[in-house]
Amino acid sequence: MSEHTAHETMTLKLIVWRQKGPDEPGRFETYLARDITEHHSFLEMLDVVNEDLIREGIEPIVFDHDCREGICGTCSQVINGLAHGGQTRTTVCQLHMRKFKDGDTIYIEPWRAKAFPILKDLMVDRSALDRIIQAGGYASVNTGAAPDGNAILISKEDADYAMDAAECIGCGACVAACPNGAAMLFTGAKVSQFASLPQGREEGRIRVTGMLQAMQECGFGNCTNHYECQAACPKGIDVKFIARLNREYLKTLFM
Amino acid sequence: MSVLKSAVGRKVIMAVTGFFMVFFVLMHLLGNSTIFIGPEWINSYAEHLHDLPVVVWPFRGFMFVMLCLHVFFGITLTLENWGANPGKYAVSKKLKTTFAGKTMIWTGLLLLAFILFHLLHFTLKVVPEVPQVLDELGRFDVYTMMVAGLLNRVVAGIYIAAMIVLFLHTSHGIQSIFQTIGLNNERTLPKYNLAAKFLSAVFLIGFSAIPVLIVTWIIS
């Protein structure tokens, strides 16, 4: 039996990072979240708070969200020191208020990394991840007739491995959780996904060098094998993909 | 982008130089272990080693280069990483990393200081002063030097403390080597972690045993 019934509501103290713009200094503001039930998702709880703020004439808290189904990778908040709130394999939108109790104090902060400048409040600019993808996170397809789907055979093992890597939704939690602000799990997942498939191997060399260069130019840090990224990843992307990225890079030096 | 500028390239340099230094530490431990057998053994070992200057000097040069590269890239990568993560969280929790992992730069710098102290102490024999005598076969008496040198409790304490620092550094570093050079997956990672802790514990116990046994007069 849950601690709260549908009729019971919670009141929580939120300590939220507020920042007017990219170049403005930010600060924490304290708000009360009232009338929250265990059925609210974390983002719905913020919706309720924002309604209250609007009524009080205060600018609502800006935060990123889109699908609210845990698949788009848009929501991005560090809750009580943990990216996406720390529930295993869960994005903020799928975190529910039943995980909190009446009277809790919750710190809500944006992703913090040099490569992710804060745009406003909890919203950061994650286009650096797009720039890494643009530098090689694709397999070129020549125009013409559609290729026969069965012309290139792929083993179940390779397909599964590629799918595990492709689970990355590009939310940036790995960067937010990394003590070095590194994007190695993201880049490693993308490189591994292509490296394990015949279609991706053709451009393997330019992909890994291009994506690593873009990663550095965007201002991400270097991996020191803390493995915080995997622990924070809402899709459970394994650090073996970072080892794969390292391996693919080393291949470019010797092959 | 050259290896010396690449994010992964520089980490690989850290891993490879670290690997050679771990290998050196292991060899050093095996050599030192001759002290447990007796003065005859360690003095003979030291003499044979120094009878081979064509091996010793290039090896020393190689280890010096490994150390310099490891220290240089360790410091520059750390400074870069600090720069990449400028805005600290008001509340920060970690799920996976270890104390050893988080303190690599500090344990590394402490080890650098210890290496300099150790070279001054037993290689250059400058500070603190150690007896330099010959044994009955006319060889340099390493045994007496070590026993006298480590009888001082402060000096012995420095050596033991340094070995605890080494334990921390290698317990994160050894498993890191395999991840960085790409020889890792979800099955091997726990094994590397275990092997790293085991080897680090061997270093800690093996090296610390010498000052501990000397201070307690078990080796005299």
Image (cartoon, rainbow, N blue to C red):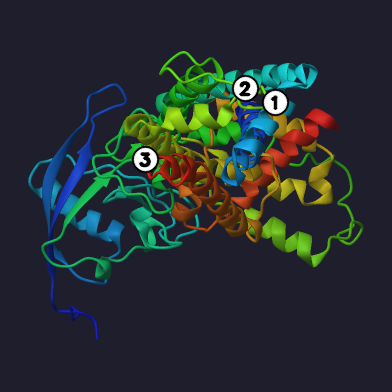
Residue A43 horizontal side relative to residue B165, left or right: left
Cα gap from disc 2 to disc 3, whole angstroms: 61 Å
- Which of A50 and A211 lies nearest the eye of the viewer? A211
Chain of residue at mark 2 = B
Pointer 2 local density, CA inside 10 Å: few below 14, some 14–19, many at least 20: some
Q: Nearer the viewer, residue B179 or A126?
A: B179
Q: Quadrant of residue A62?
A: top left
Residue at coordinates 76% horizontally, 30% vertically from top-left? A206
Seen as rendered, the residue at the extreme bottom is A1
Secondary structure of the residue carrying tag 2 is: loop
The kind of residue on which mark 1 rests is Glu
Q: Which chain does the residue under circle 3 lie in?
A: A
Q: Earlier in the sequence, mark 1 or mark 2?
A: 1
Pair 2/3: label in front: 2
Label pair 2/3, CB-CB below 8 angstroms? no
Is A36 on the left-hand or right-hand side of A202? left
Name the residue beneath numbered marker 2. B140
Helix, strand or loop at mark 3: loop
Q: Indicate left or right for B88 with B195 as reference.
A: left
- Residue named by callout 3: A111
- The reply to whether discs 1 and 2 touch (Cβ–Cβ < 8 Å) is yes
Badge 1 density bin: few <14, some 14–19, many ≥20, Cα 10 Å:
some
Q: Quadrant of residue A133?
A: top right
* Image side of residue A156 versus residue B68, left or right: right
**Disc 3: CA contacts within 10 A as few (<14), some (14-19) or many (>=20):** many
Asked if marks 2 and 3 fall on the same chain, the answer is: no
Q: Quadrant of the N terminus of chain A?
A: bottom left
At x 61% / y 30%, what residue is drawn? B14
**How far across and how far down the image is residue B13, in percent?**
65, 28
- What residue is shown at x 44% (from left), y 47% (from top)? B218
- Answer yes or no: is residue A115 visible: no
Residue at image mark 1: B47
